[in-house]
Image: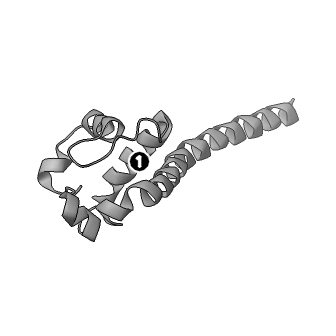
Amino acid sequence: MTKRIGLLNVLLFSGAATVAMFLLVTPAMSQGAGEKVYKAKCASCHGADGAGATPAGKATKARDFCSDEVKKETDEEWTTTIVKGKNKMPAYDKKLTDAEVKDVVAYIRSLCKK
C-alpha cells in the first residue's frame, strides 16, 4: 500500500511539474516566434530595438514603440495597425497569421521592458 501511495505522489508531482514547465516555456516559445517574424517583417523600418531610427523608418516616420504615446495603445490597436496598415505602413493581413500577429505584438511589448 505504501508503494502505491508513493508512486501516486510521484505521478502527481511529475504531472504538476510538466504543466508548470509548459506554462513557463510557452510564452518564451511565443516570444521566439514573434522575434523571428519581427526581424523578417518589421525590423527593416522599426529597427531591432523598435525605435524606428533606421533609414526606412525615418523616411516613413515609423513611430518608436517605446514612446509613451505608442505604449499607451492597446494590443487590439496594434493588431489593427499590423493587419490593416496605417499611414505608410503596409497591411499584413495576407502575409501573417493571427497567431503571428499576436506573437509580434507580444515581442514588441517585450522590447520596451529591456
Name the quarter where the N terminus is drawn.
top right
Q: Residue furthest left?
A: 69
Q: Is residue 89 left or right of residue 31?
A: left
Query: Which residue occupies 71% across, 34% down?
Result: 12
Query: Which residue occupies 32% across, 65% down?
Result: 47
Asked where in the image residue 44 lies, by quadrant, the reply is bottom left
Query: Which residue occupies 23% across, 42% down?
Result: 86
Q: How is the image coloured?
A: one colour
Nearest the eye: 13 or 89: 89
Query: Which residue occupies 33% across, 37% down?
Result: 79
Q: Is residue 82 left or right of residue 62?
A: right
The reply to whether residue 54 is in sight is no
The reply to whether residue 94 is in sight is yes
Q: Which residue is mark 1?
A: 104
- Sort mark 1 into few (<14), some (14-19) or many (20+) by Cα contacts within 10 Å: many
Q: Name the amino acid, label 1.
A: Val
Task: Pinpoint residue 39: horizontal percent, then vertical percent.
Answer: 44, 60
Above or below, 110 relative to 101: below
Nearest the eye: 110 or 37: 37
Instruction: Name the secondary structure under disc 1.
Output: helix
Above or below, 55 relative to 20: below
Above or below, 58 relative to 62: below
Nearest the eye: 58 or 7: 58
